[in-house]
Image (cartoon, rainbow, N blue to C red):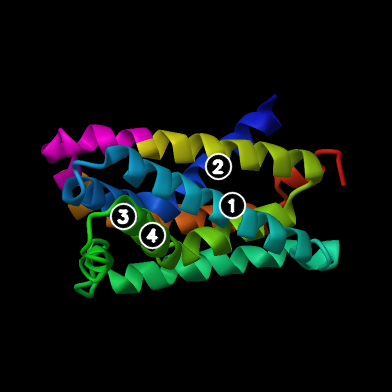
Amino acid sequence: MFEILTITAIAASAFIGTNLDNLVLLVALHTRYHDHPTIVSAGYVTSMVLIGGICLLVGELGELIPLTYLGLLGIIPITVGCLALLRLFGNTKATESADSSFTQSTPGAIFTTLLITQLSNSSDTIITFSVLLAESTDISDLEITLVFLAMVAGFAWLARYMVNHQRLSHVLKHYGRFVTPFILILVGVYILSNTATDLLPGS
């Protein structure tokens, strides 16, 4: 039970750490296309399911790496986290990509906008979850996938909720980016260690 709780916590933390900027972006797009909330949510969920599929594929390829070296993959999210810390000194904002997106408000254009913006802004999610899936067993892969999908649904709901609570959006936009690097570094340290996912039977 402890191992299951540990994996759930790590997977949820990894999702939060790599998707806070996507949540800000999703809130911005909900505000921009306020007449089409269902299309915006559908575009977000579709893009995240595609990202999850990519992570599973890359994770399967990563399992070809000898077990002795799998833990070293933890260096990747640590590096991403350190680079995110460096970017904090810049002026980039998660919502900038939304401003460069399509300006049309037809359902097809909105859906395409969500796909493009979320996919282009999710490299850290793909890297982190691919490493987690490569480093874990088949049983753990299933749990990580279920947590990923649950977090997608949770973020889709939270974004729509935050549109009507601008104070929450403001806090997330201005302070969420400071949390992300440390979560990524924590996930990397977890992978580098002798983790619970290595001990579960499956593969």
- Describe residue 37's horizontal placement relative to residue 127 as left or right: left
Residue 22 is situated, as x and y percent measured from the top left of the image, at 35, 54
- Whichever of labels 3 and 1 marks the residue nearer the N terminus, that label is 1
- Whichever of labels 1 and 2 marks the residue nearer the N terminus, that label is 1
Identify the magenta region.
157-170
Q: Nearer the viewer, mark 3 or mark 1?
A: 3
Q: Quadrant of residue 103?
A: bottom left
**Front one among 173 and 188:** 173
Mark 1, secondary structure of its residue: helix
Q: Quadrant of residue 162?
A: top left
State the residue position of label 4.
112
Principal SS element in the magenta part? helix
In the rendered view, would you say 48 is above or below 112?
A: above
Residue 54 among magenta residues: no
Mark 3, secondary structure of its residue: helix
Picture residue at 31% right of the left edge, 55% below the top: 110
- Describe residue 90's horizontal placement relative to residue 123 as left or right: left
**Which numbered dot is residue 52?**
1
Quarter of the rendering occupied by the N terminus:
top right
State the residue position of label 3.
110
In the rendered view, would you say 199 is above or below 98?
A: above
Mark 3–mark 1 contact, CB under 8 Å? no
State the residue position of label 2.
148
Picture residue at 83% right of the left edge, 66% below the top: 64
